[in-house]
Image (spheres, grey):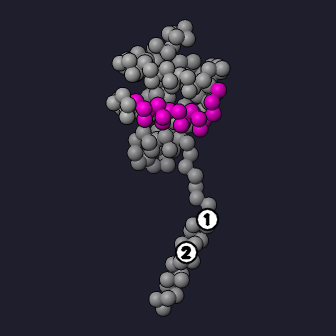
Amino acid sequence: MKKQLLIGIAVLLVVAYAMPQKKNSLEFMLATIDKGYVSRDDILIVRFRNLLEQLDRTFKENKTQISDMTVGTQKILKEEVGIKESLLNIMVGMNSIFLGRKTIQSYAEFCASYLALRQSGQSHRDAIAGLKAMMNIG
């Protein structure tokens, strides 16, 4: 009886691992990084999805690259500069620079410029305003 139970458990485990695992969406992963635990229907996921779509239309990089660069920017800010900034704030700020217009600009270059401005002591708001000023926007 014990042996049959162990065989049954082993079969269940094999079946469970053989089944395709649901891949987490980029927006779910960003929300989890920003907030910690989030439910699958958290409004933050929708916000990240909308931002990714807007940024994807605005910059030349794709959604995965934009996500990775934003997380990298946040990590550098925290670890090297000692500034805690949310992914949402970074992405909202970057999105506000061009207000949805398609550009040939690089998200990576804007992240690097944003980091440089933040490292020089500027606030998030001032850094985004500085990026807009560099582009002669608003």
Q: Amino acid at mark 1?
A: Met
Q: Residue furthest front?
A: 80
Is 13 drawn above or below residue 98 in the view shown?
below
Q: Which residue is mark 2?
A: 12
Q: Nearer the viewer, residue 21 or 50?
A: 21
Q: Amino acid at mark 2?
A: Leu
Rendering coords of residue 115 (x, y %): 45, 24
Q: CA distance from mark 1 to mark 2?
A: 11 Å
Q: Residue at x 51, y 44 (%)?
A: 28
Q: Nearer the viewer, residue 112 or 38?
A: 112
Q: How many marks?
A: 2
Name the element at disc 1. Answer: loop
Q: Main secondary structure of the magenta part?
A: helix
Query: Which comes sooner in the sequence, label 1 or label 2?
Result: 2
Query: Is 68 part of what is drawn in magenta?
Result: yes
Q: Is residue 106 left or right of residue 88?
A: right
Query: Is 62 part of what is drawn in magenta?
Result: yes
Q: Can the viewer see residue 125 in this picture?
A: no
Q: Which residue is mark 1?
A: 19
Span of residues in magenta:
60-77
Rendering coords of residue 64 (x, y %): 59, 38
Is 4 drawn above or below residue 17 in the view shown?
below
Rendering coords of residue 20 (x, y %): 62, 61
Name the element at disc 2. Answer: helix
Q: Residue furthest top?
A: 136
Q: Residue at x 41, y 48 (%)?
A: 37
Q: Can the viewer see residue 90 in this picture?
A: yes
Rendering coords of residue 107 (x, y %): 57, 26
